[in-house]
Image: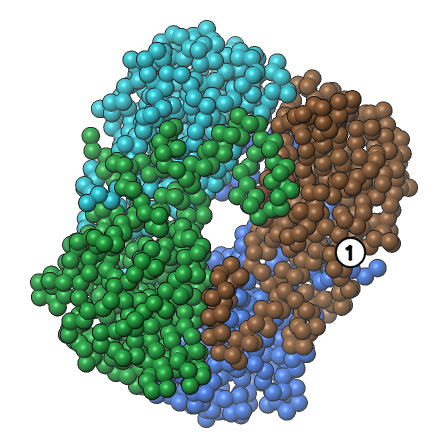
Chain colours: A green, B cyan, C blue, D brown
């Protein structure tokens, strides 16, 4: 009955740790070795037992700042997080939308293995935004990723230009135009919380059938995830509109929005309304029909996250208002558009490359069960 | 906020289920489809989204009575079971032995997907035992399996004869002799609880380094699991000894014993004592040294399970005594010996085939995280 | 390590239970006695150890159909339910409204000790409604209860007439009139799920400060809970309006609505909108301001429950529409109005008795921690 | 959906906390007030809602260093701890003994509200031990407490002298002699972990019937808990024997031993063996019968805790051996003897006072459900 490993020892006074050399050296030593395995050096493992992932080929060298689920392979807390995510998936299957609050999202990201320092880094990353191709009250950067189930990995994809058309229920002065956004930089690319958010989204939407859009390749075993880091600004001379276009959809299958933070913003700012599909596209937020409203959400705390089946609801947002109207108000957002690769006839055809990003590669495991392959 | 899927609906009166067609047909219908995906037909899935396992190659046709972890890929309860098993693994790393009780073992087997009817079937399977090659007070059958991490699967292996030698701290009249046991039959082979027990053992021992024995190939990514289904008998004319050899080891790396049941057995029967390695091999149970005893365990309820790092402790058992001494007393047991494949010089060299069993194939997924392969 | 009690034994085949007499009779017997204590006869307890509740005075004779929390005093599942309810309380403190879904509510009621048969009984109880004093499209019954923390109990109170006035943001043809409803009958009074719902509400609202209304005695350690069982009817000749009055409040501190079921009702019926307090009282559901909407809820499954701090939001509901318009559509509801006792000047002054109901008494424990009294 | 309270905020970078004033002031403010209630000033509560405990009389002024369960009345984690303790109680009912490991015990103490600093304080408190009345290799202090279910409180009792007799299966040179131990001092008396340990023990043994001893008042609703803080010493000139008397019982109903720590002690020191009652009292540890051993336990980490039904098993311990034999080895222990008050004929009759300790009073709530009293 003795010798329980003490995950909590670090939280105890030094004195207590000084008092635990009582494990017989031989076994104790081995134990520590064993424990180490669960969290560290693969080489060490290779010397005495199968590595946690039982790779069929040696895994490629991993980057220093990549979220590697395998690090958690032996930790029960990791699987408790997976269990919670599957409960969110159940609800997403039912409602086609979920709102995960700050506190739980932080716990889930920790459970997936996000690094503590990256929570703080994510809150200030939007300070480095510079411009937006078409909107004066917004700053933006973009990054493209592939949830590639053929490789069971999340890959960053090379840059492409971006367009949204009226055909996707998006009516704005810049509809159908080709927009060229700045790319996200190392500070966001290397954030394990950002990586965890996409792994989370992949798990929740996995295997959830939704109403299909035309010109998407639903037979593909890959998803394109176009990610935007946005800052909406309101100043005395300009009103920041997170959705100037009023009621709209994003032209994808699954939209996720996660909140890094804001400044000088009133509590009634940037409210999101979900509308039934029969609400008229382009209707201003304040003129929508109460009896066509399906839900309301407001991002108010770090990592508050909304996920919506984008073709099954429309949505609209209220403007960003300043508490101190003489000062600038900012509202930052991380938006993840996810859809199947496009086919001919789609406005994005020709700018939907699945090539990996060469200058800033990222290629980390998604969560999947082992494949059922048992070939001889 | 509406439309939560109701796992508990089956437990509610019919009236209530009759009252739930209120989900709008379009979404509701899709939902049911989605739910179905988590538990049923792969073909249905293939039509609209990646299958739960994202196989790189189509999984081989599965048998009707195989435990297929993928069936649970979307169920949060499955991951809660994995989390509990990882907690047991933590303890095993520390103590090199765990005892999992009836109740929790039943829950874990359910969590892994074992079929309800197989719990009852496992309790009577020992009634079909016939003979034992060397012991008059025992009936036995054996089966060989491979925890094959190169294929991430649990495979049944072809038949081989069996030997235990004094070199493995096993001293009995039949040490070093070649024993030929009957093979387990379909009734046990096809039991999803039996399959779950081996998947459970594979998870708990995975990546846990133990003291090494000579002539084992510790570099191999496979484990040989020799499984025995035993019935020990005590009659007026004979005393059943689960361990006639007294203090011993089983000559493997990890030994697991699971209890299907017994009949007419006294409460003080078949007690297991764990001894430090410096206890003398062959010492009778009742003559062992109290200060070399590491633990005591007794299997008394269906599925009580003991797991021990076999080279780090020795063990002994007390006899089976009858409550009604005029009648036969029986004590059934499932024993799982697991070790690395042997190398030259080991008594089993030449009878340690890794070929799959041809007449009764079994090849089901083990639990592993996806491999880290992200090759271009 | 042996002898784990098996709560799950009932779920196992008879065979297995037949195989568990292995616990030594003396201890085993005692154990069974001990287990019994947690769930049964007080007299048996009194003979050997303090009863689970350590009453300072013998508890009064309990009725056969009363929910008695003490029955769960030793069950870990009971405290897990309390933990979940406290998590809901945290959210209620933050948002001033929560929506608890069917599935979880069923689990919570089970956790508190509700009887299985009462879930079915609650779904049909509304069939016994007869009349409504003022509304042609509604049938109703009422019951009054006191969450009496001076006695740590939930008591049924004697009958009183009912009124709602414009002063409480309730504008309807029958505002300020005195309405006399039928009383609830034994079939609802004795339902342990109904009792559990009020115990649940008491726990969630306990110690949660809300905006105060005039003429309530906020110093009192008691709450008056006026409960209504309602059926709204839509027929070819009449439209059922759950809230004919449009935007309104209920003139209390905490309003809870729980859904027993409905029939022939369309999915877009009886949607609840929560409005900010500056929405105009009396505004029809479909004319409310989108930017004053705080939330939307819809009761669609048995026991779906909405709780709202009634003075901090206003609410409105959409009508009940029939699927088959030639037939009657019904929508049943349990409504729990809870407020402090009124003082002079309140319209209910003079009809707010705290006397127990004489013909149909109910007096069961609320959940509280022991008082801190440690007098000598 | 917004505004989830963030228990984890403290763990987040300052930046994030700076970004959470977005809760509308009016509601947000109230929320904070509400949250505060769960953890702080009763007066504040009194102004607006029933205090968490609904005392029938104002609780007495509490000391600064008393564990007050009411502080946790609204915290879900508290009830999760209670649930875990009830699971341990289930096992105690079955086995009559449990061993709770370091890590879980620390979590349970935190869950009950023990102060962080008291974990460290408890590890060094034994340094202040001075003498023992009869044993040269031991230092000791004692304190007497009453688990008083008539008052639902844990009280410290006035000092009394101590005796153990052969009648209680305790055979040692000082059997039957009256021993006068030093009293525990403020440093231990005021430790909320020590207080939590007794509250934990009271919950686990509550309502668990055990084999009765003669001359105890089993009708009493009170338990006497005699607590010892011991340090066993081994030096070149003397061997420390935690149980010089060999196989014995402690003459009570429930014995609990909790480990604060040790120094220079070998891993095989101070092993506890549990023996069946038919083992001969006085038998040395190393001469006991293997087939009468029921279990083995060893305290090796801070707060490792063993609980035993003292009249249903006997126990013995191995000596304390020094790693560096030239130096002193120490092994500290907290022992809690709990039994019903004695009646005439018991050796302790006349020294079993139930009077509260005057110089060092302690009177804190035990965990109980509210009494069922619902008198009119």
Q: Position of residue C217 (x, y in %)?
A: 66, 82
Q: Position of residue C265 (x, y in %)?
A: 33, 74
Where residue B299 appears, as percent x and y from the top left, is 52, 28
Q: Which residue is located at x 40 percent, y 53 percent?
A: A114
| Residue C340 visible, this angle | yes
Q: Residues within 10 Å of mark 1 (few under 14, many from 20)?
A: many
Above or below: residue A136 compared with residue B173: below
What residue is drawn where x is 68% and y is 50%? D118
Instruction: Determine the residue positioned at 43% across, 61% down.
Output: A120
Of C253 and A231, nearer the camera is A231
When the figure is inspected, residue C45 is found, relative to residue D300, above or below; the finding is below
Q: Nearer the viewer, residue B266 or A284?
A: A284
Q: Is residue C173 above or below residue C319?
A: below
Q: x and y percent of residue A330 in the render?
A: 38, 76
Location of the N terminus of chain C by quadrant is top right
Camera sees residue C127: no
Left or right side of B188 for C38: right
Q: Name the residue nearer the viewer: B176 or C120.
A: B176
- Report which quarter residue B21 is drawn in: bottom left
Residue D265, by quadrant, is: top right
Residue linked to disc 1:
D363
């Amino acid at each position: 009955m003795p010798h329980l490993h003490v995950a909590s020892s670090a939280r105890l006074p030094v004195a207590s740790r000084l008092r635990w050399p009582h494990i017989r050296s031989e076994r104790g030593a081995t134990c520590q070795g064993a424990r180490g395995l669960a969290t560290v050096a693969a080489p060490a493992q290779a010397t005495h037992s199968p590595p946690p992932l039982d790779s069929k080929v040696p895994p490629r060298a991993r980057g220093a700042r990549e979220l590697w689920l395998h690090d958690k392979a032996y930790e029960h807390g990791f699987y408790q997080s997976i269990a919670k995510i599957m409960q969110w998936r159940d609800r997403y299957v039912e409602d086609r939308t979920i709102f995960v609050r700050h506190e739980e999202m932080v716990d889930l990201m920790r459970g997936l293995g996000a690094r503590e320092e990256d929570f703080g880094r994510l809150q200030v990353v939007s300070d480095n935004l510079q411009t937006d191709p078409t909107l004066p009250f917004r700053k933006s950067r973009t990054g493209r990723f592939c949830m590639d189930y053929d490789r069971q990995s999340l890959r960053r994809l090379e840059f492409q230009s971006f367009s949204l058309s009226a055909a996707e229920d998006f009516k704005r002065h810049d509809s159908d135009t080709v927009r060229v956004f700045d790319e996200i930089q190392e500070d966001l690319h290397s954030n394990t919380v950002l990586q965890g958010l996409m792994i989370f989204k992949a798990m929740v939407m996995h295997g959830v059938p939704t109403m299909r859009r035309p010109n998407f390749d639903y037979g593909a075993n890959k998803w394109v995830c176009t990610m935007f880091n946005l800052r909406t600004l309101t100043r005395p001379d300009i009103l920041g509109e997170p959705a100037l276009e009023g009621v709209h959809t994003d032209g994808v299958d699954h939209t996720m929005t996660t909140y890094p933070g804001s400044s000088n913003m009133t509590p009634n700012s940037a409210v999101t309304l979900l509308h039934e599909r029969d609400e008229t596209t382009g209707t201003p937020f304040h003129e929508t029909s109460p009896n066509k409203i399906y839900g309301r959400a407001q991002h108010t705390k770090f990592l508050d996250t909304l996920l919506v089946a984008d073709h099954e609801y429309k949505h609209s947002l209220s403007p960003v208002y300043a508490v101190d109207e003489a000062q600038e108000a900012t509202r930052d957002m991380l938006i993840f558009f996810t859809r199947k690769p496009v086919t001919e006839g789609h406005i994005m055809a020709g700018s939907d490359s699945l090539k990996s990003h060469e200058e800033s590669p990222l290629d980390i495991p998604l969560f999947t069960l082992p494949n059922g392959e048992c070939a001889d």
